[in-house]
């Protein structure tokens, strides 16, 4: 094999390569064997097709390319190392020829790093003019940055609300969920719903929003102004109370846009523009005209990084609080596990729940909730809603009758409240039993009971007889009081926003909100924002 090197203009080098027939033939045979193992030739086991059959099946040109890809990289590397070339491009083949005598000729070229010969620069002198900053230069620059606002419609691919008319739905959780503004809270999308559609209906209705991972969701009816980033999921349909915003990726980052919409200045505008008495709402055209501060993408990225650090710290504190709650649940369960014969010198009474309490459900539906209602409205989730009317005025324990909250969600209420038709109220009627004691006892014992005897269809559910037959161990009222006092203290440590970790988490959230608004204020107190009718 011979390799000759020819230097060309523009820092290029040409290689002229000649490979002897013996070497070329040997490499050709190896190429045939390699390709035979990768190609399925009809009538032959893989790797067993003869060379002449393989040549007809894949073509001689394919075999020749296999030879080149096998031997040329080593030849190029050797030539570059031996000549100490500083290469800045990969070698490219100009021509190649497999001659009749089986020899191979290849011409290739590549580009070298230019050689620069610097003159003596040690004695050079440079005069530096005195820099004079123009008056108000800093203020003018800040104003220039502040003027970088864009209407939301100009930096998005699409802004659309959800379905105005609900399609036929079922409670089959294998389908595609339908969710509303109620499901967008705490910066997440809550997929807890009772409405699902088939794949065929989803394909039709999804054309309206085509929600994808990373889209910004904004609630525009009811609890207006709440946001979340669309998570990765198989697909979801939105009701008209949710607006789907698709940012132009070359203009604005999704997470930055979400932080801007969450900011105080934008939230105040949304609140002012919201119309309606019983249920507030804003129009899509108002959303489209929101003015968004638009710094360069690298600045957006840095703002997101800083704000993410605050949210990550809050997440760490929340995880610590979750661990404390686990600890609380352990001691709660220990306190509420009795000998079943004697507790503190007093025989424990074992009774069914229906013997000590009134059991019943409410008459309300979720769609009757209003954002600024007067009374708590207990549904089947952990977060109560609001209503302007009430059904009961009493001390009661509330639990979900079906859905994901069965056996896990409990509320304790003293006073007026409304109740969902699939949620249960437990009103203690025995004066020797403290209602709060039963509340804690249910939290500790009821879920295990449900797991053993629960009725399952498309979602987990309980029936009134199951609730009525639940056995409760009742110690003396003095022991009940002591247990309630201890567990109230534990509960305060885990839930009270004025003490401990909950207070620290609340403080960090306020700190995050302060710096978020500070970072996103590109004009004085958001004065660049314009209200639209």
Image (cartoon, rainbow, N blue to C red):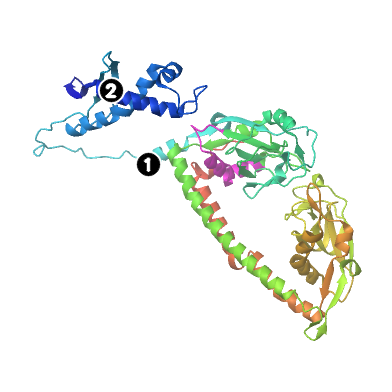
What is the quadrant of the N terminus in the image? top left
* Quarter of the image where one finds residue 106: top left
Looking at the image, which residue is at 66% across and 64% down? 495
Looking at the image, which residue is at 81% across and 53% down? 461
Crowding around mark 2 (Cα neighbors within 10 Å: few <14, some 14 to 19, many 20+) is many
In this picture, which residue range is highlighted in magenta?
A: 247-271
Q: Is residue 487 visible?
A: no
Q: Where residue 303 sits in the image (x, y, percent)?
A: 47, 45
Image: 487 above or below 201: below
Q: Where residue 182 sits in the image (x, y, percent)?
A: 72, 45
From the image, tell me which residue sits under label 2. Answer: 24
Q: CA distance from mark 2 to mark 1?
A: 71 Å
Looking at the image, which residue is at 77% across and 77% down? 338
What secondary structure characterizes most of the magenta part? helix
From the image, tell me which residue sits under label 1. Answer: 138
Image: 37 above or below 108: below
Q: Is residue 525 left or right of residue 12?
A: right
Residue 249 forms part of the magenta stretch: yes
């Amino acid at each position: 094999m011979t390799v000759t090197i020819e230097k060309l203009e523009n820092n290029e080098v040409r290689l002229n390569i000649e490979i002897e027939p013996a070497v070329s033939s040997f490499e050709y045979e190896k190429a045939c064997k390699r390709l035979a193992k990768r190609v399925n030739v009809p009538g032959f086991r893989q790797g067993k097709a003869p060379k002449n059959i393989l040549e007809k099946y894949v073509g001689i040109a394919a075999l020749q390319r296999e030879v080149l890809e096998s031997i040329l990289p080593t030849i190029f590397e050797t030539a570059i190392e031996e000549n100490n070339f500083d290469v800045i491009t990969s070698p490219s083949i100009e021509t190649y020829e497999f001659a009749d005598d089986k020899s191979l000729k290849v011409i290739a070229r590549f580009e070298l790093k230019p050689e620069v010969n610097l003159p003596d620069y040690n004695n050079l002198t440079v005069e530096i003019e005195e820099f004079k900053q123009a008056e108000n230069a800093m203020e003018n620059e800040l104003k220039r940055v502040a003027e970088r606002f864009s209407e939301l419609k100009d930096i998005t691919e699409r802004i659309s609300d959800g379905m105005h008319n609900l399609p036929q739905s079922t409670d089959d959780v294998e389908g595609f969920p339908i969710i509303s503004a109620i499901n967008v809270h705490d910066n997440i999308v809550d997929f807890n719903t009772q409405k699902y559609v088939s794949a065929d209906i989803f394909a039709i209705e999804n054309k309206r929003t085509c929600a994808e991972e990373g889209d910004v969701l904004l609630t525009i009816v009811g609890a207006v102004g709440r946001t979340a980033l669309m998570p990765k999921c198989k697909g979801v349909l939105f009701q008209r109370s949710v607006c789907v915003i698709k940012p132009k990726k070359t203009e604005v980052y999704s997470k930055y846009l979400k932080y801007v919409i969450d900011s105080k200045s934008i939230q105040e505008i949304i609140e002012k523009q919201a119309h309606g008495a019983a249920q507030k709402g804003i129009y899509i055209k108002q959303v489209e005209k929101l003015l968004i501060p638009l710094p360069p993408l690298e600045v957006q990225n840095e703002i997101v990084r800083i704000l993410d650090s605050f949210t990550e710290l809050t997440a760490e504190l929340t995880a610590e609080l979750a661990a404390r709650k686990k600890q609380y649940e352990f001691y709660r369960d220990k306190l509420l596990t009795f000998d079943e014969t004697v507790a503190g010198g007093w025989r424990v009474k074992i009774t069914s729940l229906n013997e000590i309490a009134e059991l019943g459900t409410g008459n309300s539906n979720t769609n009757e909730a209003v954002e600024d209602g007067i009374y708590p409205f207990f549904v089947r989730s952990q977060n109560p809603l609001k209503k302007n009317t009430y059904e009961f005025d009493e001390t009661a324990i509330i639990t979900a009758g079906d859905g994901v909250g069965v056996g896990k969600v409990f509320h304790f209420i003293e006073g007026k409240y409304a109740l969902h038709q699939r949620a249960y109220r437990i009103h203690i009627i025995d004066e020797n039993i403290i209602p709060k004691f039963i509340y804690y006892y249910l939290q500790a014992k009821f879920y295990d009971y449900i797991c053993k005897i629960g009725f399952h269809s498309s979602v987990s559910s309980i029936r009134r007889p199951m609730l009525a037959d639940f056995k409760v161990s009742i110690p003396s009222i003095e022991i009940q009081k002591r247990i309630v006092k201890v567990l109230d203290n534990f509960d305060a440590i885990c839930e009270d926003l004025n003490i401990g970790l909950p207070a620290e988490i609340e403080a960090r959230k306020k700190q995050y909100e302060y710096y978020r608004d500070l970072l996103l204020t590109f004009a004085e107190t958001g004065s660049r924002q314009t209200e639209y009718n």
